[in-house]
Image (cartoon, grey):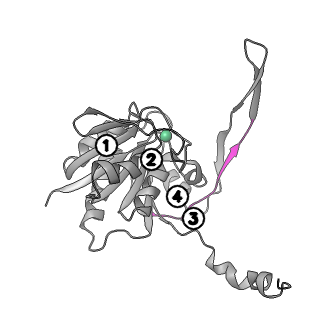
Amino acid sequence: MKKNILVTNDDGIYGVGLRPLIRELQKLGTVTAIVPDQERSGASHSITLHKPFRIHEMEPGLYLTNGTPADCVKYGVRSLMKGKVDLIVSGINTGPNLGNDVVYSGTVAGAREGAMLGFSSFAVSVAEQVNGDFEQAARIAARIAAHVMDMKCPLSKIYLNVNVPRIVKGMMLTSVGSRVYDENVECRTDPRGKKYYWLAGSFVAGEHHEGTDITAVAKGYVSITPLHLDPTAYNEFARLDSLVNDAPQG
Ligand code: MN
């Protein structure tokens, strides 16, 4: 039976990774792409609640929205695809989503929303900010997509975060590392004499621990990180027990 694949992204309709991804995934099934009408990088998992959400069919199978990646997946699954979804792919993002980036990333949130709705989902990014090889990343995304759709059980309560370096030596399952930014806040004055601020943080270094997404990509491996939907710190229950049990009741 033909597979139904939903695609979203956070770079929006003009994101350079969108078309290569759609083209490669079309070899595996019917692709419905539903994407923001403008760049939503850094939107994380925000959703539209206080204004109407609009969907405009730009061409067959490609829909534009005024929302975020999480919106696109939510409305795409419910309204356009009526729940008939075999896989959700979010990307291909321009630039890496490594370490702490997964918290801020709209791309990763697209996949997280897919997983929350109960579908196999992954996010995919090229690890270069400039000159990323989107054709190669699209072929790798399609290979992962085929594998995930062939799995006996769909991914459940987890989703995947994939980062593709320019030179690929192989693939690696990784953990979330921690990326370090120098988060300078630049203060300037606008032409009307009012101050404004701009986050000018640039990536400085990651802690290069073995097995992390950062290290894998630095060594030329496609990093695939399985991420839990459930962020509960189960290991901490014992240590925090006294917080609730030694406290005066009432
Ligand atoms: Mn982006």
The answer to which quarter of the image holds residue 156 is bottom left
Residue 183's place in the image compared with 242, above or below, is above
Q: For mark 3, what is the residue?
A: 210
> Is 209 drawn above or below residue 48 in the view shown?
below
The x and y percentages for residue 56 are: 33, 34
Q: Nearer the viewer, residue 55 or 96?
A: 55
Mark 1 and mark 3 in contact? Answer it, CB < 8 Å. Answer: no
Q: Quadrant of the N terminus?
A: bottom left
Q: Which residue is mark 1?
A: 33
> Mark 4 to mark 1: distance in Å?
27 Å
Mark 1 or mark 2, which is nearer the start of the sequence?
Answer: 1
In the image, which residues are magenta? 173-184
Kindly state the secondary structure of the residue where label 4 is placed. Answer: helix
Q: Position of residue 84 (x, y in %)?
A: 25, 58
Q: Name the secondary structure under disc 3.
A: loop
- Of the numbered discs 1 and 3, the one sitting upstream in the chain is 1
Q: Nearer the viewer, mark 3 or mark 2?
A: 2
Which residue has dot 4 on it?
213
115 part of magenta stretch: no
Left or right: residue 209 versus residue 142 is right
Give the residue furthest to the top.
Answer: 191
Q: Find residue 226 and report its horizontal and vertical position in percent.
A: 46, 65
Marks 3/2: CA–CA distance? 35 Å
**Badge 3 amino acid:** Glu
Q: Residue at x 75, y 29 (%)?
A: 186
Label 2 sits on residue: 71
Amino acid at the residue labelled 2: Asp
Residue located farthest toward the bottom when viewing the structure as drawn: 245
